[in-house]
Amino acid sequence: MSGQPSPHLRQSVPPARRTVLKGAALAGAAGLGAAACSTESKLGHARIPTPTAPVDLGAADAVPVGGARLYREQRLVVSCPAEGRYRAFSAQCTHAGCVLDKIENNEGNCPCHGSRFDVTSGKAVVGPATVPLPEVPIKVEGGRLVAGPDA
């Protein structure tokens, strides 16, 4: 023997195609999971968390005094703490950007991970969200609610 390893010991066996594909899929899924579950985000994955132009929400009296109403399509929640006074917040969860799906006892519910928000203040009351909902300007014009910039 010449001190060299035999040729068959120097050859490496390539991994099976299935092993390589499984590893790539798991690495990708792990990366997506880490990004989706970040609690550091102030706006989650929302591209535009509030209206970029004024939005007519309809009759102001549709929001009950002492209660709130979810405008899911417009991604807004509006509360009425006292007659003629309104507060509006983005209805997109600050954890992962999902839109709230319902309001119960003045708490907005996120269907994705269970976060809950006080819809009168925007404060996160149940995690994983820790950042409050961003407030949105709102005003009454001719008996109708208008939310968004310049409202």
Image (cartoon, rainbow, N blue to C red):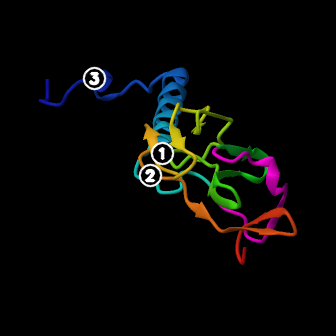
Of 129 and 6, nearer the camera is: 129
Decide whether residue 50 is among the magenta residues: yes
Q: Compared with residue 74, is residue 66 higher up or lower down, i.e. above or below?
A: above
State the residue at coordinates (72%, 64%). Answer: 51
Tell me the CA gap for discs 2 and 3: 58 Å
Read off the magenta span.
49-66
Is 123 positioned to the left or the right of 99 in the image? left
Check if mark 2's residue and mark 3's residue have beta carbons within 8 Å.
no
Location of residue 2 in the rendering, given as x and y in whole percent from the top left corner: 13, 29
Of 96 and 130, nearer the camera is: 130
Q: Secondary structure at mark 3?
A: helix
Three-letter amino acid code at disc 3? Leu
Which corner quadrant of the image does residue 53 belong to?
bottom right
Residue 9: image tag: 3
State the residue at coordinates (24%, 24%). Answer: 6
Location of residue 20 in the rendering, given as x and y in whole percent from the top left corner: 49, 28
Q: Secondary structure at mark 1?
A: helix
Residue designated by label 1? 35
Q: Compared with residue 140, is residue 113 higher up or lower down, i.e. above or below?
A: above
Q: Compared with residue 107, is residue 79 higher up or lower down, i.e. above or below?
A: below
Q: Secondary structure at mark 2?
A: loop
Three-letter amino acid code at disc 1? Ala
Location of residue 94 in the rendering, given as x and y in whole percent from the top left corner: 52, 49
Of 27 and 53, nearer the camera is: 53
Which of marks 2 and 1 precedes in the sequence? 1
Quadrant housing the C terminus: bottom right
State the residue at coordinates (81%, 52%). Answer: 61
